């Protein structure tokens, strides 16, 4: 199989393990050529650090895209995440329209917030724009907070004992009448378990994936999840199998992160475990 190529449109945060510092190594380990298009450069991510620097790369995005277009580049995946400005929503949408081919998988991780709150740099207008961008995706990977934002609903805890039904209803609603696939993360179907509820637009099937929940708050798991999912789908896995690989990998990383007693803001200690992702 030729090496698949992915355009990765995320920020580059120098310290704290998220976005491109997670996306590039994971896709590379999974045998995917990753072509980064940084949306911003930050000294650290915005979760748990004060005084971080933020260089907005909005102007650079269309310039780089035009150069790639002039080179005739094709991508088997376009995978976007954290955006640096409201204007980037339209620029990423233009990028998708320009580069999408029959065989291109468009993954939009609608990064906006967690635990019911938007991230520091996300305005309500950006969140509304993210919903427009996500409408172009083949696959979206929201957490429960982002799902509530996309659906225009209030973020409320899942009803105890009825998690499965509530999550199925959410992925159905997020699929836009079955047009796009959804892997909804932070989906716990039983105490001590966590994972994702998947809606596969290719088959119409809804399929939960679960793993053991490691009780330790972890920053950046969404980026690890969406990156492994994208890599696995480019290897030909279906959505549910790709999501299962992603949650199993995060579980292994979480165990290691707890052993290392890493502070929450330093992210998932995944680097020594990248070998688990190398295709046999
Ligand atoms: O993990 C999502 C993410 C990506 N990029 C930046 C962030 C966050 C979450 O806080 O701050 C810069």
Image (tube, grey):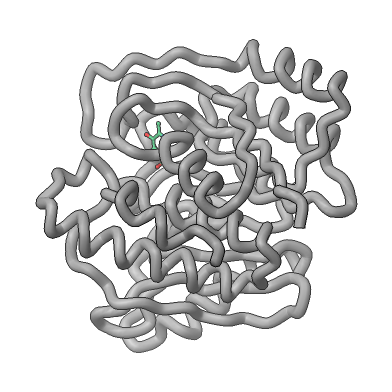
x 29%, y 34%: residue: 16
Q: Residue furthest bottom?
A: 161
**269 shown above or below 65:** below
Residue 32 appears at what percent x and percent y?
62, 47
Residue 81 appears at what percent x and percent y?
54, 40
- Mark yes or no: residue 232 visible: yes
Q: Residue furthest front?
A: 280
Please identify the quarter of the rendering in which residue 144 is found: bottom left
Decide if residue 75 is on the left or right side of residue 46: right
x 65%, y 50%: residue: 107
Q: Ligand 1 sits in which quadrant?
A: top left
Decide if residue 159 is on the left or right side of residue 197: left
Decide if residue 142 is on the left or right side of residue 96: left
Q: Quadrant of the C terminus?
A: bottom right
Residue 74 appears at what percent x and percent y?
82, 38
Residue 233 appears at what percent x and percent y?
65, 62
Please identify the quarter of the rendering in which residue 174 is found: bottom right
**150 shown above or below 179:** above
């Amino acid at each position: 199989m030729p090496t698949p190529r992915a355009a990765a449109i995320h920020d580059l945060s120098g310290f704290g393990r998220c976005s491109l510092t997670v996306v590039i190594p994971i896709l590379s380990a999974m045998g995917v050529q990753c072509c980064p298009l940084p949306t911003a450069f930050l000294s650290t991510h915005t979760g748990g650090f004060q005084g971080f620097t933020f260089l907005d790369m909005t102007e650079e995005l269309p310039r780089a895209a035009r150069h790639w277009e002039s080179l005739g580049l094709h991508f088997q995946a376009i995978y976007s995440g954290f955006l640096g400005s409201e204007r980037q929503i339209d620029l990423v949408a233009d990028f998708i329209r320009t580069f999408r081919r029959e065989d291109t998988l468009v993954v939009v991780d609608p990064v906006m917030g967690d635990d019911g709150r938007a991230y520091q740099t996300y305005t309500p207008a950006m969140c509304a724009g993210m919903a427009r961008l996500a409408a172009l995706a083949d696959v979206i990977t929201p957490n429960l907070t982002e799902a509530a934002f996309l659906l225009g609903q209030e973020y409320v805890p899942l009803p105890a004992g009825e998690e499965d039904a509530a999550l199925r209803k959410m992925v159905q609603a997020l699929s836009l009448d079955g047009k796009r696939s959804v892997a909804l993360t932070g989906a716990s179907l039983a105490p001590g378990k966590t994972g994702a509820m998947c809606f596969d637009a290719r088959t119409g099937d809804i399929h939960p994936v679960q793993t053991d929940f490691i009780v330790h708050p972890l920053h950046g798991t969404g980026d690890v999840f969406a990156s492994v999912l994208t890599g696995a789908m480019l290897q030909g896995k279906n959505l549910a199998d790709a999501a299962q690989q992603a949650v199993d990998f995060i579980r292994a990383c979480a165990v290691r992160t707890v052993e290392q007693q890493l502070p929450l803001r330093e992210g998932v200690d995944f680097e020594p475990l990248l070998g688990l992702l190398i295709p046999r």
